[in-house]
Image: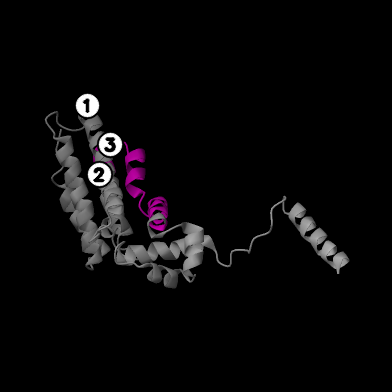
């Protein structure tokens, strides 16, 4: 019996040596990226507050222990979802600001791409960051989403101030008000997409919104 126990112990030591000195854990039985995408779609469809942990585990196809082990709690999972959303679906405004030569071109491109992104098939309509804040009663999440929206408006305001300095916009332009106007249009487009507005309808709205752009 002693010889058998020694042999088993030697096997365990050998296995640990092969795995870098650490006991081998149970392999994850699901694809993390796929589970994250499913969580993203659930939050996008229902918002933060209305999406329960049981809703998430059902959508992701995993158990509650696996969710907590892989992503942390619901709030931590949502924070990762928002980062993923920004990288994959919500970065069109940042790209437009970085790539377009004028503030007007950047705003017009942002609105037109919002019309496309907010009505694209294969995922919920509208903007996750806007929709997830609806009826949100978790202060940390509400604050985080608010800060993201404010940061987006601030990025437009900064670009508009540069445009004023360069003579693209009249010197008396209120950059802050113009940036908030753009933010209001984008957020309104998100809600209208949720309510069933088509890409063409939102593109028409974008065209009307650009008609008030100040002329230098």
Residue that protrudes farthest toward the front in the picture: 2
Q: Is residue 94 magenta?
A: yes
Q: Which residue is mark 1?
A: 165
Foreground residue among 129 and 96: 129
Judge from the rendering whether residue 149 lies leftward or rightward of residue 215; answer left or right: right
Q: Which residues are magenta?
A: 77-106
Sequence-earlier tag: 1 or 2: 2
Q: Which residue is mark 2?
A: 150
Q: Which residue is mark 3?
A: 102
Foreground residue among 26 and 181: 26
In the image, which is nearer the foreground, mark 1 or mark 2? 2
Residue displayed at 63% across by 63% down = 27
Residue that protrudes farthest toward the top in the picture: 165
Q: Quadrant of residue 76?
A: bottom left
Question: Where is the C terminus found, in terms of image quarters?
Answer: top left
Tell me if residue 177 can be seen: yes
């Amino acid at each position: 019996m002693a010889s058998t126990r020694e042999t088993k112990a030697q096997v365990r030591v050998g296995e640990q040596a092969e795995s870098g000195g650490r006991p081998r854990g149970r392999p994850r039985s699901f694809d993390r990226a796929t589970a994250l995408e499913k969580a993203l779609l659930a939050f996008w469809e229902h918002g933060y507050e209305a999406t329960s942990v049981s809703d998430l585990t059902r959508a992701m196809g995993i158990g509650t222990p696996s969710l907590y082990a892989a992503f942390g709690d619901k709030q931590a999972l949502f924070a990762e979802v928002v980062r993923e959303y920004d990288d994959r679906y919500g970065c069109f405004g940042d790209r437009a600001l970085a790539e377009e030569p004028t503030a007007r071109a950047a705003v017009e491109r942002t609105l037109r791409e919002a019309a496309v992104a907010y009505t694209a098939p294969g995922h919920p309509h509208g903007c996750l960051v806007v929709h997830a804040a609806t009826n949100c009663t978790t202060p940390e999440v509400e604050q985080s989403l608010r800060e993201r929206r404010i940061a987006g408006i601030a990025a437009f305001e900064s670009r508009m101030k540069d445009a004023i300095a360069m003579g693209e916009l009249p010197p008396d332009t209120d950059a802050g008000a113009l940036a908030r106007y753009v933010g209001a249009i984008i957020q309104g487009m998100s809600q209208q997409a949720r309510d069933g507005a088509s890409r063409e309808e939102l593109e028409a709205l974008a065209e009307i919104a650009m008609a008030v752009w100040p002329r230098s």
